Each structure stands twice: as structure tokens, then as C-alpha cells.
Image (spheres, coloured by chain):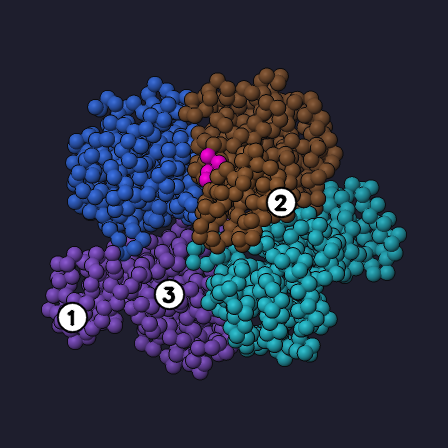
Chain colours: A cyan, B brown, C blue, D purple
Amino acid sequence: MKRVVVKMRKSATKLEVAQALRLMECRNLEARFVNHPDGCMVVAEGEVRDLSWLEDLAGVEEVVETKSAFPLASLDVRTTPTTVSLAPGVWIGGGEVAVIAGPCAVEDRDQILTTAESVKASGAKALRGGAYKPRTNPYSFQGLGSEGISLLEEARSLTGLPIVTEVMAPEDVEWLLPHVDVFQVGSRNMQNFSLLKTLGRVDKPVLLKRGMMATIDEWLQAAEYVLAGGNSNVILCERGIRCFEKRTRNVLDLSAVPLIKSLSHLPIVVDPSHGTGCRNLVPSMSLAAIAAGADGLIVEVHPNPEKALSDGDQSLTLSEFALLMEAVRQLASVLPGRAKEEVLCSSASVA
Amino acid sequence: MKRVVVKMRKSATKLEVAQALRLMECRNLEARFVNHPDGCMVVAEGEVRDLSWLEDLAGVEEVVETKSAFPLASLDVRTTPTTVSLAPGVWIGGGEVAVIAGPCAVEDRDQILTTAESVKASGAKALRGGAYKPRTNPYSFQGLGSEGISLLEEARSLTGLPIVTEVMAPEDVEWLLPHVDVFQVGSRNMQNFSLLKTLGRVDKPVLLKRGMMATIDEWLQAAEYVLAGGNSNVILCERGIRCFEKRTRNVLDLSAVPLIKSLSHLPIVVDPSHGTGCRNLVPSMSLAAIAAGADGLIVEVHPNPEKALSDGDQSLTLSEFALLMEAVRQLASVLPGRAKEEVLCSSASVA
Amino acid sequence: MKRVVVKMRKSATKLEVAQALRLMECRNLEARFVNHPDGCMVVAEGEVRDLSWLEDLAGVEEVVETKSAFPLASLDVRTTPTTVSLAPGVWIGGGEVAVIAGPCAVEDRDQILTTAESVKASGAKALRGGAYKPRTNPYSFQGLGSEGISLLEEARSLTGLPIVTEVMAPEDVEWLLPHVDVFQVGSRNMQNFSLLKTLGRVDKPVLLKRGMMATIDEWLQAAEYVLAGGNSNVILCERGIRCFEKRTRNVLDLSAVPLIKSLSHLPIVVDPSHGTGCRNLVPSMSLAAIAAGADGLIVEVHPNPEKALSDGDQSLTLSEFALLMEAVRQLASVLPGRAKEEVLCSSASVA
Amino acid sequence: MKRVVVKMRKSATKLEVAQALRLMECRNLEARFVNHPDGCMVVAEGEVRDLSWLEDLAGVEEVVETKSAFPLASLDVRTTPTTVSLAPGVWIGGGEVAVIAGPCAVEDRDQILTTAESVKASGAKALRGGAYKPRTNPYSFQGLGSEGISLLEEARSLTGLPIVTEVMAPEDVEWLLPHVDVFQVGSRNMQNFSLLKTLGRVDKPVLLKRGMMATIDEWLQAAEYVLAGGNSNVILCERGIRCFEKRTRNVLDLSAVPLIKSLSHLPIVVDPSHGTGCRNLVPSMSLAAIAAGADGLIVEVHPNPEKALSDGDQSLTLSEFALLMEAVRQLASVLPGRAKEEVLCSSASVA
């Protein structure tokens, strides 16, 4: 049983791709076409001894054999780090530190606009905010829904910040598509395969949170679902795993950062808010995440955390966030491999 | 902040129910109507001191104050154990031990029909089999889909066994509804709230597996999503939680059985196959589950486990299952609170 | 690198054993002499190709090659289940169900004598009670110490029940030796290797609790420390592992019971008191443990749990324990492989 | 039930301390004398309403009421960070970053001397090396014992580095006392209360590793055992907790660093070697630990990791360690609250 990735030439015609696919299927390889940003690819599996005939097919550039369970996400297929663009001039990956900030849930117009303006001024590159909230209890506040999306769009108009928001069901993807900049997949949905497949068919970035119970390998295979569908704009997000410790909401597994870097070309950001559940631990863990090599952070910020409808305990105030951003900038400037002068500055030009 | 469940009289008119709802909302109670099998109910929450006016509303039978996060699933609202009917003459709960058996995945016609006939002969009450499989890897066998459903229906025609099969996405519920007897929600989807809400609106039973990293309280709140939607036919299924031990796939948490019994009226079955991941541990853990008070088992059985496309290591052969059923019958006959003569016999009359 | 167990003949002289040891060391095998109940043995490891010369040594009966990390505890070296004698006529292992009962800690004369008489009357085979308590907090009650040991001895005189008590430090083993019948090693000390080595040199049984964080393999290797020292009277005790669930103190991993049976000849008992931390879960989990194949139980019982100095929440009252013993007897009588007529009756003749 | 810490004046006479103790006991307070570095203290517990009489006792400076389960380790009793001296001019805590480095186990003279000289040159402040090794398997290399201690002393003579080595049993403490500079308590012994009590009576620092399944509160209570014995030179060490992830040996819980800082005055170092089990993750996690606020690191270094008798996979080479130290220095220089010019330089003057 072998797994191969057949990379097609950029110049390959549709016919050549279709013929390659058919020939592989004829030889009992289970083949799957992927519209990868590096060019068309076919991921194939099966019982074959000799693979040289594949290299001879018209339009084929290279045949990569792989043992990886997540070939498209692995370094076997792409060796350079992926940079995901959130909006013109705003991207994640590639040496800079990007910070996404905002409230857990969009609660009202004033809350989201105030937060957006403030986090923008402090240096955030994108605005987070939930309109559809996955809540453990059916009677808890479930988010403002489409009204929340409209408020996020208003905040984007005001500040220029792209918006990151959670999508919970495959049937919501289509209508949300024109409104959001990044689809967030929450921890509880990391293995909602129906949702992942749907997001594989869109062209907007996906921020894929690690399941609270997921191993690194399961997480990368979840990402592979999106990549295999043809959407290679996946940003991984470590947000803590479940453990026995009771003082923190989760255990933030920062070793995931260098591990992901050693296994995959995908960028990874860290969520110290859910990762700890405690506001006073967020700054230290944010700095630790960046020192560990994270491509960015996603941080919960609220103008008045005591009155937040959800996650108040783990949200920073606007001024706490401003202080954090200063420390982040200072730290990022001395870390090896970070383009010092550019760090955190790309959104400045938007103002 | 108080939570109350307002039980309406069976004789209450639609108008009375609507008026009660409206009055609660006028007094700033967040109220939610539930079409409960014990009669219509309204679950309401809010800041009120005095609740006596609720009791005086037309059509109201009783007002139950509760601190439970899952009032409809709790013993506060219903004190007698719920019995869920799978098919005429086949039910789960109420003192008997019911066994659901079958392969992990429907693989072909011969496999599912052979298994169905054999487990029926051994005393199983229902047939399990996956047509849509949630697979960690996107390139793994994903199930036969609608073809698998047809084969399950053929097996039902042949044996009379109701069929239990997994549903993975809300958009599949509607078309599956006329074909399946029990909707299974898998461990990875326990907090797929969109799916749970959809299943709350159908009238077929839901077998809700515990998430591999879910607490008992999170599990019961997931059940509450289905109940709050109006579908009270929920069967809980303990299937092991994730842990550090490497010899077993999961740790089967049998204390969940008496715990659930002390917190809820819902029936609970145990899945020793996923709970251990090892065929040779299945019989002991099946007996242990029943001794702990489980209402039944769901067991993976395959005519040829070595050739199974998934979960072969944890599947019993047909003859191992027959032996297990004998031991289960013998054990169930001596346990307190089990109606000895009836145990496991209800399906006998179908033959 | 090979690991072998060299079994010496019962008739082998001391000289033959010494010569065998020396020759193995000459050939660069790291050899370790063990005074095993089945006869003298030498466990040896090293880089050798041919082992036939070992079989030709004077006094050697058999050479067993093994890949097990715990050869003496494994089924490679001993295929029949080990029965451990606690006192004349009282043993654990071998098909019967033996129950050890008593308070968490010995608190005063009245408490321990009352408990001992009552659990004896209900059918317990041994009395548990802590005189030296491992407490998380340095300011908590640490046990009565030597005074507690004297009270346990008085209880033994009164009832004939052998006593099981915890030893926490290697330096206590020697003075405790004439006073106790079974040394209990607590969960926190499962890998206190200094303690395990000391207990390997005594001839009293050791009840080795599984560490709250220990895998099955680590646990069996801890047992191997005792066996390799020459003491083969080890009883394993599953008492729950630490997990994320908050409703129970630990997760009682009953799959450990059939797993241990498939890997080792040592007997295993289950502690449902620490395993759950909740009195009302103890009866169900006791029955489940026995159905899973456990050789016995160790249960916390207190005349007045509300006033217990430790573990009151998980202790049964005297009458609850009497009811549990009835259910245990009934269950054990129908399980396969249990000698029905003898179950739980061996202590009856003492009365 | 109240818990108080009675601080005595520095000028208090022995008689005054003895009288205070006696009076507390007379009033049914359970009182315990502690020879604390801030002066003598009495920790007392009991049922009293009014505590003003305590303040009036001769020699009493202050009475602190506390709800903490670890009063001496808490910020209630001491608000300034504790600095622990390892040797003249070498300390842990107080704003600098101190790095302890060396092999898992002392293997031979050449290995330990080479390592000591090299890590000294790279800027390490202390040398680690195990002579008594806690090994899961009884047949594994158990360390060189007293010979290893002699080799460590030779390395100290050569380099001036104080030595940190593990002690596994209370009976070893006395003879090791004149030979070692810091007693390390391993993860498996974190709740070996007999060992902790013995170490409470010596005047050398104790490096207390977190148990692999210990909560923060259990860990601080283990430290309290040492403090309550009169030894306040405790250094905490986070070394990873056990979890389900299989790619790493443990999950390094860096949130422990800011959590400990918010709960205790004791210094905390981080062990990224055991915390990850993978050499290539050690540098990133070292930097992350320091960014999180750790007072130092303890890192495994070996001249030839491939040939190491234990933990080779997680040991850095000498040159990898040198590179790490450069990065550590650079990072520490920009972090807030670090005395930049002094960072990592205290040992330079020894050369």
C-alpha cells in the first residue's frame, strides 16, 4: 500500500489532468484531485510496485511518495511555510507575528465597534467575534446570529480589520461566504467532517482550532480534509487541551507550536484566552507562545469583561490588550527568524 | 436568576399554552416551549422573586424550580426511568438488558445480512452498522453512504431487527428519517449543536454517544439540546474516554452508568468495543457494564474481523457474540431490579 | 539484547546456583538471582546469540526467553494464576472473590473494633485500616502511627481477620513486619522504588495499588521490583486513574482487570471507594468489578462516615456493607470460573 | 476552623517561642513550629473565634490569618520572591535566569567532566547528573550510586559548578548531605511524604519536580511539607504532565509558571527535556519558558546523546546547548522585570 502525490505542471491542460486521473484509477489507485495553490495535484493510494509510469504521464511534473497521513499538510509536498492572506496587506505566516483580537461574542453595536477601534489602534491585524456560539448548555446565550454578522461588517468598514468568526454548520457556509474574511472552526467541531468538507470547497481562509481532545496527528488530518477539498488556506490554532488541572480551563500545549513547524508548512497561532481561562495568565502565555515560534495570537478582548455574556474571566480589557501588544512587539523584535522591522507593522499602513 | 419548568395540563389548549408563554416573556423570563412526552412544558429562566403567579395561569399543572443545567434530562422533572421504543416490541430502558450488535461499517450485502441473521439468532434486539463513517483520515474508507442504508433496510426486512446508524450532518437527517430506526450521534459529534438541534425536531430515537473527552455534565447538556427541541427519545451511550493508557483505545468509564442513573431518567447503554479497542476485553467489560446497571450494550460484530475495513481489532466474531449473549443472559437473570423472566426475551417472539 | 529467565531445578544445590550465576556474568550477561516460589530463578540480560549452553549448566531445569518487561510477573514464566495467602485459610486469587474492608484510617479503639466485628460478620476476609496516612496536606491528620497498629492487632485478635495496612517508607518495613499481615503500597508510592525493593526482601504479601497516573505496563514493572527481590506475594489493586471528569474522584479503569489477567498471573482486586470517591457509586462498581473478573475488592467502611477523619464521602456504613456483601455473594455464584459453593465462605469456618 | 501563621520577632527568646507554642496548644490549637528564614513562625489550626490574644503574646510580631492550604509557600506569609542560594554567588530566583545543565545520568568520568566543563563555558550556573536513577524497569541501569556522587564532586572541583542530583529515599539524605549542593526530588516522588519530611530537616536546597499527574495545589502542598519542616529553600520545577498526546513524552504546562508566581513566593524553573522528550523541541520550549517568566531552566545535555544510557532522545549535544544559551541570553535581556545587565552573568566571575 503506497500513498503518492502527483504534482501536475502549471501548464498541464484539463485533459491531461483528467487522463492522469483515469489512468491511475485503471491501475487500481484510489485517486483524488486537489486544486492546490502550488498547482493541480492528485493524491493517490493503492497496491503498486513501480511508480515510474506515473512520472511519464503527460502533464506530470513530479511524483512524491509519502508515508504521511496528511500529505498535503506535510513538508513532503511543500517545504516552504504557507502564508495565508486574510485581506489585502494582512497575512498570517512567514515570519511576522499577527494578532487577532476581539470579544468572545458580538453582544451589541457599541461593544463591537469600540473593541474594533481600540484593538486596531493597539496593533491587531484582524477582529474576532462570535455571532454563532457553540454553547454547552442549550439555554445559554447562543449569539446574535445574522445580526452579529452585520455588526462585524460594520466594524470592518470602520477599521479596515478583516473579520474572523465561527461557523458551526455546513449549511451556514454558503450564506456566510460573502460576509466573513476567515471561517473559524471551533474546538468541538474539529472533527465535524461534514463541515470540514464544505469548507474545503470555498476560497476563504479557515482557522482550525485544535480539538480539546485531539492529538497533533488528528488535528493535521482534520486540516487535510480542508486541503484535500482544494482549500489550502488553513491556519492552525492551539487553544489548550483538556486535562486534570483545575486552576486553568485547559492546558495550553505550546509544544504544539514547534511540533507543527516540524511536521507541516501550515501557519499556527495560539489562543491564550481559552488556553488558560484566566485573564491574568494571558500576557505571560502570549509571550511564551511567540517565543515558542507561533505565527500569531488570537486573544479575547472586551471593553467591560465583568459584564461579558461569555468568557469574561478570560478576556483582557482594552488597555490590558494595549499593554500586551507593546510587550509582544518588543519580544518579536529580538526573536531569530522574525523580520524585525516589519513585525506587527503591516496593518499600520491601513490607518 | 431562576430556572423553572412549567408543566401544562394534558387538557391545556393551544391558546392556554401560547398565553402562558407570552406572559412569561412579558415578565422578562426567557421561555422555551417543549413538546414533552409527559405533556407540553415550558422551560423558563430569569430574574423573578415570586413564582406563584405561574401556578395560577390557565392550563398550568405544576411549576418545578430546578438548579439543574439539564432540567428535562434530570430527575427533577421526571422521576421514573424513560423507556425508549426502537420498534414495536423492542425498547431500551425499564429493567431489561437490550443488546444492539453489528459491524462497525456496512461493507457489502453478504457481510451485513450474515451478521444480521446471526446476531438476531443470538438474541440481539437491534442491528448497528455505519453507512456514513466519521474517519480521522480523509483518505480512509468513508462508508457506503446511501447504498449502505439500503443494505441495512434489506437486513431489517430479513430479520425484523430495527436499525441503528450514525448520522454525521444536519442536512442528512431529513432524508434518512424514513429509512432508519435510531439515529446514532458519534463521539466526535456529541457537541455538534447544529446536529443535536435538528435531531430535536424528529420523532425517531437518538443514541447519543459520550464525547471522548466529555464530562458527564456536558453529555447530559448535549442530551438536553435534543430534549429541548421536543424529542425525548434519547439513549445515552458510554463508549470510553480518552486517557494516557496505551494498551486500550479508550478507558471505559463504567461509573458513568450509576452516575447517570442518579442524575437522569434517560436510559444508558455501554459500548465495550470502542471502550476498549480490544476484542478479548469485550466480554468481561460487557458483563461489568450490565453488573453496573446498564440498560444494554452496543457491540461490534463482524463475520470476519481480520478483513474488516474498520475496527477489526475490536469486533467479535459471530460465534464469540453468541457466547457473550449466553453469559449476558445468565448474569442479567440474577441482578436485582431486572425482571428475570423477561430479560432479553422480547425479540424471541419476533422469530 | 536478549532477556532470559533461567529456572533452576528444585534439587539444585546452592553451589550449582552460584556457579550458574558466575558463568552467566562471565559471558557478559547481567544476571540477577530470584528466590521464586516456583524455585530459584536467574533473570539475565545481554548480547548473546546462542543460549543452549545455559540449558546444559548443572542444576538448570529450563531456559525461558522473554520479551516481557516484567518477566516474573508475566505469563511467560508462570502460566497458572498465583494465589496469595493472607493468613491460614484466607487467600486472594484462584477463582474466589475475597473482600477486604475497613476504615480509611484507624481513628480510635471503638471505631476499629466495631468495624472489624461487623465486616467479619458480613463476610469480609481481611481488615483494612491506615495507621500511617499519606496526606496531600502536611497539616492534615496523618494517622495514629504505632498506636494505630496496636489497635489493628487488637481487632485481629478479636475477629481473626488478617490486617492490611499501608507502609509509606522503607525504614518502617522492618518494625512493621511482625505486626501486619499485608503491606499496602499506596497509589502515590507505586514508583517509590526504594520502598518496593525493601518489600522484595520480606515474606509478607504486598498489596500494590496502581498509581493514579500509571499505565498497566508501569504498574506491572513496579510489581516486578518486588518479585525480583524474591517476594512473589503481590496482589495488584486497581483504584482509579486521574482524569478530567469532576463528578468522581478518579476514573475506575475496570478494563485493567481482564488486561492484567491476559498479561500476568498475579491476582487483582479493585478499590471502588477511591475509584469513585462517592459512596452511592460503590455498590454498582463493586458488582461491575467482580463481573469483570476481579479476585476481590477492598472497600472503605466506617461506623459513622459523616464523622470520619478522612474519606467519609466514599465510605459505606456497616449496614450498607452488609447489603453489598449479599449482592456480591449472589453475583459471584453465577459467574463462570468461580467455584460457586466456596465463594466467600472460607472465612465462615473461622467463626 | 481557622488557620493562622504566628510570626515571632527576630528578638524573641527561645522561652517566648516555647511559651507561645504551649499557650496555643492549651487553647486547642494544633500548633507547629517552623524555623523560617524570615524568623521563627508557628502554624496553628483550630476552632477559635478571637485571635487578638495571640498578638498580645510575648515575642509575637504578627498574626496572619490564611485560607491557603500551603500558608508558608503562599504569598500570605511572604510577599517578596524567595531567592535560593545554590553556592556562593549562585542563586535561583530574583529576576535572573539561571540554567542548570548536565546529563540525565552520570555514566563515567570522561562523560561528566567533559559535560561539566562545556556547560560551564556556555554559561550554566549548576551541574545536574543522576547517580541514583528512578527507573520504571527493575532491570534497567539504576545509576552509578556513590561512585556517581564522587564523579559529580570531581566535576564541581574542576568547574566550580554546584551539583544538583536526585535523592530517592529518606535513608540516603543523611549521607548525601555533605556531598551535594541541591537535592532533586523526582516527579515520581513528589508525594513521597517520608522523603519530603526528611528534606524539611536539612539546610540544603530542594528542587521539587511536579508530579506527572499532580495539580498545582498538590505540588504546592508537597513544597509545604518541606517548608513546614523548617527548610525554606525550595525550588519548584515544572517538567510536564501526562496526557493523551503521543508525539511528546509529556505536555509541558507552562501556564504553571505564571500560576505559581500568582500563588507563591517560591522560584520556579522549567525542564524542557522531560517536558517534551524530544531534543528538537527543547530550544523553542526553553525560550517559551523564559518568556512565561520562569526563573531558570534545567536541561539535559550529553556529549554523545546517541550513546546515552538514558534519555538520549531528549538530550542536547554540547554545541546545541551552547547555541541555546546564546538565545536564552538574548531573550532574557529584553524581558520586563529582568535585570538585564546581570542576566546569566553571575557565574562568569567564577571562571
Q: Residues within 10 Å of mark 3 (few under 14, many from 20)?
A: some
**How far apart in space, not on screen, are marks 2 and 1 (Cα)?**
66 Å
Q: Position of residue C103 (x, y in %)?
A: 26, 39
The chain to which mark 1 is attached is: D
Q: Closest to the observer: A69 or A126? A: A126
* Magenta stretch in the rendered image: B75-79
Q: Report the residue marked by disc 2.
A: B197
Callout 3, which amino acid? Leu
Q: Which residue is mark 3?
A: D263
Chain letter belonging to callout 3: D
Percent x, y for residue C218?
42, 45
| Residue positioned 33% across, 48% down in the render | C189
Residue C207: x and y, percent? 32, 39
Question: Secondary structure of the magenta portion, mostly?
Answer: loop
Q: Camera-side residue: D195 or A182?
A: A182
Front residue (pair B49, B142): B49
